[in-house]
């Protein structure tokens, strides 16, 4: 048997500037994570998540505020719904829907940010890269 | 507006499985409002198809364009430059738009990405309901503004059938009885007398029974 090739997943994290992004900054650099700060998780649309996969992401994490803590009232609820929709699209495409996740976070939860990123990286590593990625 | 719903990705994939250069065309009118075929949905379909095809090891080149209206040659002509570079066009308009595009670009394979559902309106964001049966001879002035063609499952014109139970239609508990709605509305308006007026049989020849229809306005023709 040949050696299993080493696979370092590309993770894209869309983080709300009021919760996920400050937590990520405090946590410091997490290998394999490409952080995109957004004014509110509700700003993240379906196409942004799909484009991330098209552009080479192996997994995508959207971080929004806790329920009822959204500065724009419902942005986090919309983001969670959109992630759900993207999961159904990925399933139709034939890609594991678990590759995209939504999680709630508060700005002082740096340790939790690190845990979430590493957990997703671990899951993706077990799944392997997406076959025939559009871009490497 | 015309309300439509996107086909499943697998079906669309099957329609273009042999095509390597595709133009996806959106429409900024009704299907944008019902979130089925506007610019946003064009992007999502294009991205989904690219992901699916590259997963199959058959990458595809996809162009995207959303025009003001696909049911108007004036705007369909704007696609000309992009059409030249593709083998196939996926129209994300209603059935009317698909036909206008197919009629204009006869040398290209044109396929629909949507299922055209009905003439209706937005009840709330994410919920659209049928309201008009497109019968060609409106009788809403007799029924308090509730269309018996569209809202009665049997399109009855002379009151409810025996399947009307507690205001609901026997077809489904999710469907209000159209004639109960008409009765309630007329009662509310104090116009139940309208129901006692003699009505001659409806002329269905001006509906689909008369074949494909046209509206002609010679005064605006050049």
Image (spheres, grey):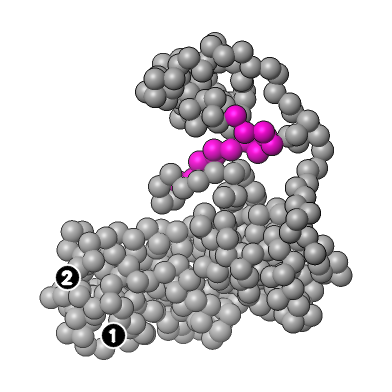
Q: Secondary structure at mark 1?
A: loop
**Magenta segment boundaries in residue numbering:** B127-139
Residue occupying the point 57% across, 57% down: B31
Residue B195, percent from left and from top: 52, 15
Residue B43, percent from left and from top: 55, 71
Q: Magenta includes B136?
A: yes
Numbered marks: total? 2
The one nearer the camera, B213 or A41, is B213
Residue occupying the point 55% across, 69% down: B39
The one nearer the camera, A107 or A116, is A107
Q: Is residue B117 above or below residue A26?
A: above
Q: Secondary structure at mark 2?
A: loop
Return the residue found at the far front.
B219
Instruction: Residue under label 2, please give it.
Output: A106
The one nearer the camera, A100 or B121, is B121
Residue neighbourhood size for the residue with mark 2, other residues' Cα within 10 Å, grouped as few (<14), some (14–19), many (≥20): many
Residue B180, percent from left and from top: 46, 20
* Both marks 2 and 1 on one chain: yes
Q: Is residue B111 visible?
A: no
Q: Is residue B73 visible?
A: yes
Q: Tell me: A97 left or right of B97.
A: left
Query: Marks 2/1: CA distance?
Result: 18 Å
Residue occupying the point 71% across, 54% down: B96
Q: Tell me: B90 left or right of A110.
A: right
């Amino acid at each position: 048997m040949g050696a299993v090739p080493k696979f370092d997943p590309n993770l894209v994290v869309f983080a709300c500037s009021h919760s996920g992004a400050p937590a990520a900054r405090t946590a410091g650099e997490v290998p394999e994570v490409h952080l995109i700060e957004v004014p509110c998780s509700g700003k993240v649309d379906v196409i942004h998540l799909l484009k991330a996969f098209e552009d080479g992401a192996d997994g995508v994490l959207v971080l929004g505020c806790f329920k009822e803590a959204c500065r724009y009232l419902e942005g986090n609820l919309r983001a969670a719904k959109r992630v759900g929709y993207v999961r159904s699209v990925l399933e139709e495409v034939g890609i594991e829907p678990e590759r995209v996740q939504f999680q709630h976070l508060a700005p002082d939860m740096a340790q939790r940010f690190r845990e979430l990123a590493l957990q997703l990286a671990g899951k993706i590593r077990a799944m392997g890269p997406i076959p025939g990625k559009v871009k490497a | 507006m015309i309300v439509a719903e996107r086909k499943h990705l697998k079906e669309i994939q099957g329609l273009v499985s042999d095509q390597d250069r595709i133009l996806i065309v959106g429409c900024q009118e009704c299907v944008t409002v019902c979130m089925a075929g506007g610019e946003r949905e064009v992007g999502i379909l294009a991205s989904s198809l690219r992901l699916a095809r590259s997963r199959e090891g058959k990458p595809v080149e996809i162009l995207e364009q959303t025009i003001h209206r696909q049911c108007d040659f004036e705007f369909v002509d704007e696609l000309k430059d992009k059409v030249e570079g593709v083998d196939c066009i996926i129209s994300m308009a209603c059935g009317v738009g698909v036909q206008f595009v197919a009629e204009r670009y006869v040398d290209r394979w044109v396929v629909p990405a949507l299922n055209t559902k009905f003439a209706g309106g937005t009840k709330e964001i994410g919920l659209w309901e049928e309201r008009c049966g497109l019968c060609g001879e409106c009788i809403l002035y007799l029924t308090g503004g509730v269309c018996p063609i569209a809202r009665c499952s049997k399109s009855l014109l002379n009151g409810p059938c025996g399947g009307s139970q507690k205001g609901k239609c026997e077809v489904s508990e999710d469907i209000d009885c159209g004639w109960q709605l008409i009765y309630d509305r007329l009662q509310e308006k104090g116009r139940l007398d309208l129901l006692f007026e003699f009505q001659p049989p409806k002329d269905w020849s001006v509906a689909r029974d008369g074949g494909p229809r046209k509206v002609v306005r010679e005064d605006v023709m050049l």
